[in-house]
Amino acid sequence: MKFRIGVLCLLMMIFSISGTFTAAGADSPDLSKVCSLTVFLASDTDQNNIAEGAEITIYQIADVSLEGGAPVYSFATAFVGCGEDIASIADRAADLENYAADNGVKGTAKLTGSDGIAKFDKMTPGAYLVTETATVGTFTNFDPFIMYLPGLEDGEWKYNVFAAPKITADAISTDDVAAGSKISVSVKKVWNDGGAIHPDSVKINLVSDSGVYDTATLSAENDWTYTWKGVSSKVEWRVEEVNVPAGYTVSYSKDGHTFIVTNSTKLIQTGQLNWPVPVLFFAGLLFVTAGIMVNICRRRVSDEK
């Protein structure tokens, strides 16, 4: 059964002949306000069984404007060619998800945390497609749905909206999970600077061919490590350090699904002076050469006698 988080909003809306729809019985929404969407994932039979590390991706499929004080929706640029009726998008979420995938439409992705929550902030008003692009553990993924921001609830416009789509746990075997497409990718920072004082934190991007997936902040507080859970094994992941600290060079290595990012000083300070080394080398070479020449001269003198 498909989850319809926008049902409260839709019950308050009527369709107009032009193919747009407006809300009745409420004041006009303030479209200058910033909105947010919080998605919570946990087993429908046990809310304490949290789905941590699931990937939620959202797409803005429609913009909104006001006509006569009522919100009117029209397809965003990326979805203009989807062939759907704007008035029926609430029932076409799966088709819109396929359209986004087939046409390379980029959404905004986030992973659920240890609290099962993925929060999307600083969203502009409009209609959004909400999908689960990577499940985790033995949880099923939820059906895609449409969310309207702001949403109308009990005659009041809500700018910060909460959604808890239905998922179930233990519906697939652990063998299926092991053979599936979900992995955890980790990054570890190593400082190769002879104990010098380095920055308190660094930012590392997890990157694919589609661009930056997420950014992690590494510091002593998290032991200079971070793990992205529930990401696709079918993607070629890599990491990039954001703004390499001045005076350092960066190198990357990989051990399994763990990336190691090493920052080295351009000249490692060890407490020893390095400049005499080449001088002593050439001085030694000079003495060896002089010794050889002396021996040759001695042999010649001996031979002449």
Image (spheres, grey):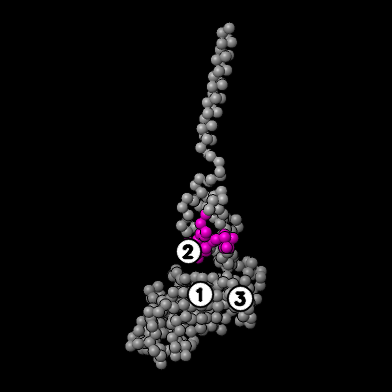
Kindly identify the amino acid type of the residue bearing the numbered disc 3. Ile
> Dot 3 lies on which element?
strand
Disc 2/disc 3 C-alpha distance (Å): 26 Å
> In this orientation, which residue lies closer to the viewer: 164 or 1?
164
In the image as oriented, which residue stretches furthest toward the bottom? 25
Q: Which residue is drawn at 39% across and 76% down?
A: 76
Is any atom of residue 150 visible in this view? yes
Return the mark for residue 212.
2
Q: In which quarter of the image is the N terminus?
A: bottom right
In the displayed structure, would residue 238 be above or below residue 305? below
Q: Relative to the observer, which residue lies in front, 217 or 209?
A: 217
Question: Range of the magenta residues?
Answer: 198-226
Q: Which residue lies furthest to the left in this view?
A: 68
Classify residue 72 by image quadrant. Answer: bottom left
Residue 46 relative to residue 75: left or right: right
Q: How far apart are marks 2 and 1 (CA)?
A: 18 Å
Query: Mark 1 or mark 3, which has the lower sequence index?
Result: 3
Q: Which callout, 2 or 1, points to the residue nearer the camera?
A: 1
Q: In this view, does 272 lie above or below 285?
A: below
- The residue beneath circle 3 is 50
* Label 2 Cα crowd, 10 Å radius (few <14 / some 14-19 / many 20+): some
The residue wearing badge 1 is 119
Give residue 260's position: percent from left, percent from top. 56, 55
Which secondary structure, mark 1?
strand
